[in-house]
Amino acid sequence: MSKNPKPFSGHDLDQVLRSIWGFGSTTIVGWRPRERAIEVIAVPTIRLFREGEGHPRVFDGARLMGPATFDEVARSLSAQPLEIRLPQAIEESEFDTIGKLVSRYSIPRTKRRAVWLIDIVGFSKCSPGQQASQLASLEFCFNVAGEICRQQGFALDPARSTTGDGFYLWNRNKGENADTDTFCLGALALTYLAALRRGTDDRVYVPRIRASFDIGSHYNYFELGSHESRGGDFIVGEVTIRLARIIEHAAPEQFLMGDFFHGDTGGEEIPTNGFVDRAAASLQSFHDLSILGTPLREFTLSLAERCLELVDKHGQVHRCYNAVLTAALGSGASLCLGVSQAPDEEIRGLASL
């Protein structure tokens, strides 16, 4: 009697993919199923970014490719596909598991995603204990806001990466609704942070922040250890660069929103003003929420009429708006993210840094 074939093992496949990856020297661009096997396109990472614009699917779209697309991408990269033999034929139900494994060793590009950058003011001047407390306070606010958003039915798969003195915050889900949910997550987290600062006697242990929010493209990659298939995902690209350049000009407690989709003639993307309307409507779902024991009565979100043009140290111009988010509480008090519009002469001074 013949033995049953060995079942599909994600762990075994991951080990093979890790070997191909070679500590990051090689990137897996795409894959397709074969008879009792999968084929992958693997390219030296340095060459990938030098030659990868030859076909749109090298960076964009799902890593699972149809036969024609797979062959086209391989030819565009002058890559010979590699076959990974499996103990038995794989079912379509296993494609998602395989795709998640492959994605760990890929560097896909996302064309649009909403991202927050939250920066702690004066972080380098604090003692190590104060710095740890400030980061822990932000972590608490992110976690509480994420749980509340999930309870309210928001479609969130939140992710964040540290910048040392703050965090990038985004949603692994994509699309217009996901972008709005990302905004609400950050807005709620920073409202909790404002409440924490108001309720403590020694504010040096709860951070004072400045914030920027934008929507744009980026690359996504995983940081993997040498032995375990675990690590965080990170983003870098147009949107993170713009956020970093914008926040350099922000005053303490200021909130700047990028002028996203400016000049886009496609007519499909919602520009900043339209996004603010959507986000303000979505924030209404938090009515009657308790913020550290005080009921929330209303959220208001306002955007300055005038668009700022900030010039970074490289001479690049970044357009953004001054924004103010206010949470009115049942006690009659309010919590605020943002400051009033700075005078023209101050903006010119900032832009010349």
Image: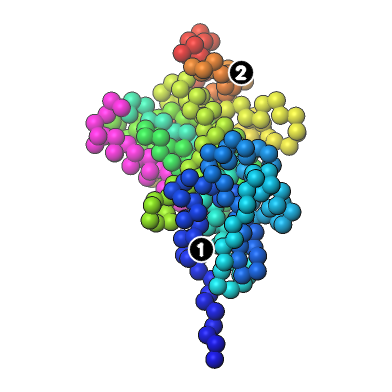
Q: Amino acid at mark 1?
A: Leu
Q: Residue furthest top?
A: 345
Q: In this figure, what is the number of numbered marks?
A: 2
- Does the magenta segment cover residue 25? no
Q: Quadrant of residue 51?
A: top right
Q: Is residue 353 visible?
A: yes
Spot occupied by residue 147 in the image (x, y as percentages of width and height): 46, 51
Mark with earlier residue (2, 1) = 1
Mark 2 burial class by Cα count in 10 Å: few <14, some 14-19, many 20+: few
Measured from the top left, where is residue 146 in percent x and y?
A: 47, 48
Q: Name the residue beneath numbered marker 1.
A: 13
Amino acid type shown at disc 2: Arg
The quadrant of the image that shows the N terminus is bottom right
Name the side, left or right, on which 224 lies relative to 153. left
Secondary structure of the residue carrying numbered label 1: helix
Choose top left, top right, bottom left or bottom right for residue 56.
top right
State the extent of the magenta-drawn residues as a range. Answer: 124-152
Label 2 belongs to which residue? 306
Q: Is residue 306 above or below residue 142?
A: above
